[in-house]
Every structure is written in C-alpha cells, then in structure tokens.
Image: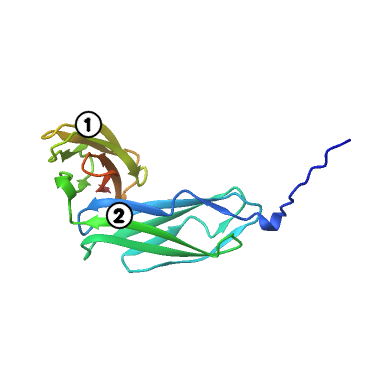
Amino acid sequence: MLALQSFVCISASERNNLKWGDKVFDFGQVGSDYKLTHTFFATNEGFKRVRIIKAVADCSCSRIYLSDSLVNPEDTVFFKVTFDTRDLQGPESKFITITLAGGDEPEIKLYTKATIGQWYFGLRPEPLSLFFLPRQKPKKVTIPNRTDDDIIAQISDIADTTFTANPLTMRAKPGQNIEIEVVPNANLTPSTYRSNFTVSIDTDKTDKPVFLTIPVKISKY
C-alpha cells in the first residue's frame, strides 16, 4: 500500500519576497558636520519582479540613491544612504521609507543611527576624520584607550572601495592605542570622494560594542 503525501503548491505570483541584508545601521559615535554613507541591499528571492515606487527621507539630513528601480528575480538592489551630521547633537535616529509594488511588503523603513559629538568612555578617534590631497602618504588613526580595561577593536564596515583601512594594533591595554592605517585607492579618477569606515570596540564597560565612525575625504586631481 502506497503512502499518500500532501504537497503545498506555491504559484509564481505568490513568491515575490525581498531578502534584506539589514534594515538598521548604527554609525555609532562621530563628530559633527560630516556626511556619512552606508549602503543597504536587498535580493529578490522570489519569482516576480519588484518595483520601487519611491524612497522618501524623514528629514533633509538624509538622502538615498538607488542602483535600480526594478528588481528582477535573483537580482540585488542597492540603497546608498547619506546622513549629514551638521546641526545635530547627541543620539539621532533617521529613516528612509521605501514604497514597493510587487513585493510581500508594500512599505519598508531603513534606519540610520548615530551619536554625534559625544564620546562614551573617552573612546574618541584621533583625528576625528582624515583628509587626503593628491600624492599624500597613508595616514594613521589612533583610538586611545582611556578606560581601565583592555579593549579589542575590529573594522565592522567600510562604506566603499575608495580606500583601504588596514588594522595595525587592534588590542589595547589601558593607556595604549588602537591603530589603523588608511590608504587611498591609487586608481581613483580626478574628483572629490567622501566616505567613511566604522570600528567596533569591545569593552567590559558595556554589554555590546561601542561603534566609532571615521569620515574619509579624498581629493584627486
């Protein structure tokens, strides 16, 4: 006697979901008057094309740039968000509203967070940002450990490929420094590039890492 099996049939019109890499990004602690960037992404894992109708920021301090307005099955769409810290102070949370057609959800919110001009536990990069003129050598960012515990750092996000951030010293005892070398991409075409990278620091003072974002500006001519 043959056992009977039941099957659930999912039609192509029902499989149209977007799979998001993340919907919230925390820049952590950063200075004021900088333009920061982060790229969100989503992959269409369904069988139906998804159309992006519009993307609206909740304030003038945020902008969004789409790689495409149509996302075919198996394609990935990128949402580059810029966040301007000018005239902001302390903890801030901003969002972009994405309106979709053809997806499982008609509306998605993408959040960027930052703590501006405040430095918890004295963890503050030196300098706060880097600026490169043509033919300048690599520069170093240091993060002094002003706590009374060991700290461990790692580079958690690099906004783009306009530079590389090379870890030199990523563990520091009290009084010592975290050190990271930043090297502009030698193949950049003439222009001005604004970017950033984020460092996460583990300390016994908190249950979760402390994030620091260091802006990087490169002029090439």
Secondary structure type for disc 2: strand
Residue identifier under label 2: 36
Q: Are marks 2 and 1 in contact (CB under 8 Å)?
A: no
- In this rendering, is residue 131 above or below 52? above
Q: Residues within 10 Å of mark 1 (few under 14, many from 20)?
A: some
Residue at 48%, 55% in the rendered image: 67
198 on left or right of 50: left
Q: Nearer the viewer, mark 2 or mark 1?
A: 1
Counting from the top left corner in percent of width and height, residue 22 is at: 44, 50
Q: Residues within 10 Å of mark 2 (few under 14, many from 20)?
A: many
Total number of numbered discs in the rendering: 2
- In this rendering, is residue 154 above or below 32? above
User: Could you tell me the amino acid type at mark 2?
Assistant: Leu
Tag shown at residue 105: none
Q: Is residue 164 visible?
A: no
Residue at 21%, 47% in the rendered image: 131
User: Could you tell me the amino acid type at mark 1?
Assistant: Arg
Q: Nearer the viewer, residue 35 or 211?
A: 211
1 on left or right of 151: right
41 on left or right of 189: right
Tag shown at residue 171: 1
- In this rendering, is residue 1 above or below 92? above
Question: In which quadrant is the N terminus drawn?
Answer: top right
Residue at 32%, 61% in the rendered image: 93
Counting from the top left corner in percent of width and height, residue 102 is at: 61, 62
Secondary structure type for disc 1: strand
Q: Nearer the viewer, residue 24 or 181?
A: 24
Q: Is residue 172 visible?
A: yes
